[in-house]
Image (spheres, helix red, strand yellow):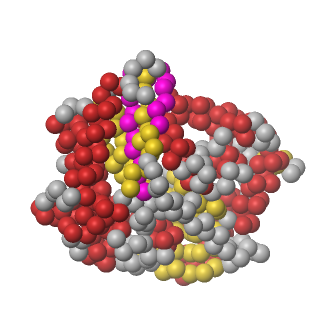
Amino acid sequence: MKITKETLLEKEGYRLHILPSKKYKTITIVAKFKAPLKREGITERALLPHVLQKATNNHPNVRSLQSAFENLYGTALSSDGSKKGENHVISFRMEVVNEAYLNDQEPILEEAVQLFNEVLFDPKTEGEGFDSSIVDREKQTLEQKITSIKDDKMSYANMRLMDHMCKDEPYALHVHGYLEDLKTITSEKLYAYYKDMIANDMLDVYVIGDMDQKAIEKLTDQYFSRKGSTNADDDQVSVTKEVKESREVVEREEVNQGKLHLGYRTYTKFGDDDYYALQIFNGIFGGFPSSKLFMNVREKHSLAYYAASRFESHKGLLLVFSGVDPKDFDQAKSIILEQMDAMKNGDFTEEQVEETKEQVIHQLLETMDNANGMIEVLYHQMLSGAEMPANELIDNIRKVTKEQVVQMAKKIELDTIYFLTSKEGGES
């Protein structure tokens, strides 16, 4: 595998990450704004990326801004918000064709970066606020999104599991915001929050592609520098809560299929020495179609429409998801708990460990094969302070032993069992 070497530079108000690679015919630029997860302002934060992408003072409507991007050989811009542990990260991603591959050598990259700069730093304003018609429209869209979460029962059950399991922890906050906040947001209030975010969030800018490093540095200095910002890392360290007693929560809705979700505390996070053992543990337990959960809950006993697990790298949680018939709650729960006991007792083979290592490595390589995937891996590493080359990452996965996986399993504690079931059936 060809390893991309990252160059990290401290700049005026931002950190620049340059990743030279001849693999891509495009240049990908990602700007990540990070701040602690807080109840206050979380809805403004959810709304902002959508408002910013709609218009700038130079391109004052959606059509004009979209046309400007399309005219740059279909340059694509997207954004999203996510939780990384107990921090809230807003990512803006732009992918532009590498002008080196164009016959006419147009200065596409600089024009695209300038447009990116307009979206981030010069959005369309009216007095001391954003364009109110854009804000109103995006508020309606976000309202529909928040409301529709309840229609996606799997996402809804996961959200409710976090509400109960991480109550009083920042991680329980809803990254898409709250309806009651949305009603109070005005274009002026949102603009005030935006100005604070631009001035005080930690900003990391990643550039990946076949490029001249000095030219990129000059370009980003021109368009991403933030005068007066210290770019201080106001990192919110994740709360590590001890489980004194696990609990069971049953909620009822108009559903045909029950959602049985379990939340565990692993006490292991990205960057910890036993993180690699957690990756292998999850692969054997519920991460792949060959896992214990899939084979025993779904295939052998035909109890679940799906059964899988995943872990939250920066919070130290392991989450199990399954869709079951409401009447099968007890049996499905017992079998899931048995699979965890089997992991703690080492009831899996050396061959399964080796096969899972290859699956995890394949998944990692696949992620890093994509420019945005590579950036995500490196950003995860930087947040955890555990930066390392890809070959070292893979070596550490290969070194995991069965005994380490068992020790990992023994650390894991059940926190909450959450069951979303029908109004009539299911256990209570």
Up-down relation of residue 210 to residue 406 (above or below): below
* Image quarter in which the C terminus is found: top left
Q: Is residue 128 left or right of residue 207?
A: right
Q: Report the number of discs.
A: 0
Q: Residue 384: horizontal and vertical position, in percent?
A: 48, 71
Q: Residue furthest top?
A: 424
* Residue 2 visible in this rendered orientation of the protein: no
Q: Residue furthest right?
A: 127
Q: Nearer the viewer, residue 186 or 329?
A: 329
Q: Nearer the viewer, residue 51 or 408?
A: 408
Q: Is residue 85 magenta?
A: no
Q: Nearer the viewer, residue 108 or 327?
A: 327
The residue sitting at 52% across, 80% down in the picture is 8
Q: Is residue 81 left or right of residue 281?
A: right
* Residue 118 visible in this rendered orientation of the protein: yes
The residue sitting at 25% across, 46% down in the picture is 338
* Image quarter in which the N terminus is found: bottom left
What's the magenta region? 249-265
Q: Residue furthest front?
A: 244
Q: Is residue 290 left or right of residue 416?
A: left
Per the picture, the main secondary structure of the magenta-coloured stretch is: strand
Q: Quadrant of the rendered structure where residue 202 is?
A: bottom right
The residue sitting at 35% across, 25% down in the picture is 326
Q: Residue 425: horizontal and vertical position, in percent?
A: 39, 20
The residue sitting at 67% across, 58% down in the picture is 120
Q: Residue 178: horizontal and vertical position, in percent?
A: 66, 40
Q: Nearer the viewer, residue 321 or 389?
A: 321
Q: Quadrant of the rendered structure where residue 303 is?
A: top left
Q: Residue 259: horizontal and vertical position, in percent?
A: 39, 33
